[in-house]
Image (cartoon, rainbow, N blue to C red):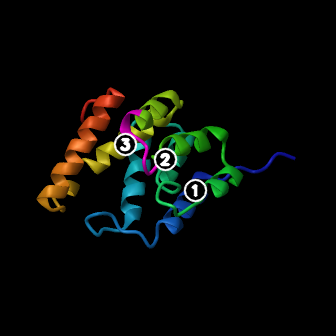
């Protein structure tokens, strides 16, 4: 009998619980970011698998869920592939990271939604000038490497 896949509601609950103790750089609950990314994926016409990856996109990178958890999760392989593609290694260069995103079906749309929320001027305005400038440059370079225009 095939394993029952997690629903989007279950994926959302898992992601919210995993990130519950986290805050973003401005001190806001991290769940606001993952919800904005999932909604951004949906608004861009993403599939349910891409929306699930949006909910989970930072879980492995942030260490709130393990690679082993992801490998064993009742998720389509495409979701697992996208989450791993979006997981930047600690010492990984940006070029290798963005190439992996471009090489993974579905991951670019999720990263586009992630960048859009990360680079939101209202969100960046909450940060000190040095951090705001550093992050804005990083996001612009990432968009350039991915062939994305600002949105």
The stretch drawn in magenta includes residue 94: yes
Q: Secondary structure at mark 3?
A: helix
Q: Determine the CA span between mark 1 and mark 2.
A: 17 Å
Question: Quarter of the image holding residue 126?
Answer: bottom left
Q: Are marks 1 and 2 in contact (CB under 8 Å)?
A: no
Question: Which residue lies at the image location 31% right of the left edge and 37% below the top edge?
Answer: 142
| Residue at point 33%, 30% (across, down) | 145
Disc ID at residue 113: 3
Mark 1 element type: helix
Camera-near label (3 vs 2) is 2
Instruction: Identify whether 28 is placed above or below 82.
Output: below
Label 3 – label 1 distance at C-alpha: 18 Å
The verdict on residue 144 being magenta is no
Label 3 vs label 2: CA separation?
15 Å
Dominant secondary structure, magenta: loop
Furthest-right residue in this view: 1
Which residue is label 2 attached to? 87
Residue 45 visible in the shown view: no
The residue at which mark 1 appears reads as 11
* Image: magenta residue range: 89-95
How many residues crowd mark 3 within 10 Å: few (<14), some (14–19), many (20+)? many
The structure residue drawn at horizontal position 54% and vertical position 40%, both measured from the top left corner, is: 82
């Amino acid at each position: 009998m095939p394993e029952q896949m997690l629903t989007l509601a279950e994926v959302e609950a898992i992601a919210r619980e995993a990130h519950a103790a986290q805050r973003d750089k401005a001190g806001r609950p991290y769940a606001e970011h993952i919800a904005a990314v999932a909604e951004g994926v949906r608004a861009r016409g993403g599939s349910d698998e891409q929306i699930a990856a949006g909910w989970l996109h930072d879980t492995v990178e942030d260490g709130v869920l393990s690679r082993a958890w992801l490998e064993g999760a009742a998720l389509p392989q495409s979701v697992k592939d996208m989450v791993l593609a979006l997981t930047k290694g600690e010492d990984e260069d940006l070029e290798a990271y963005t190439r992996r995103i471009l090489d993974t079906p579905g991951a670019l749309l999720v990263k586009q939604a992630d960048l859009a929320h990360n680079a939101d001027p209202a969100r960046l305005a909450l940060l000190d000038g040095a951090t705001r400038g550093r992050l804005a440059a990083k996001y612009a370079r990432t968009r350039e490497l991915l062939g994305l225009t600002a949105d």
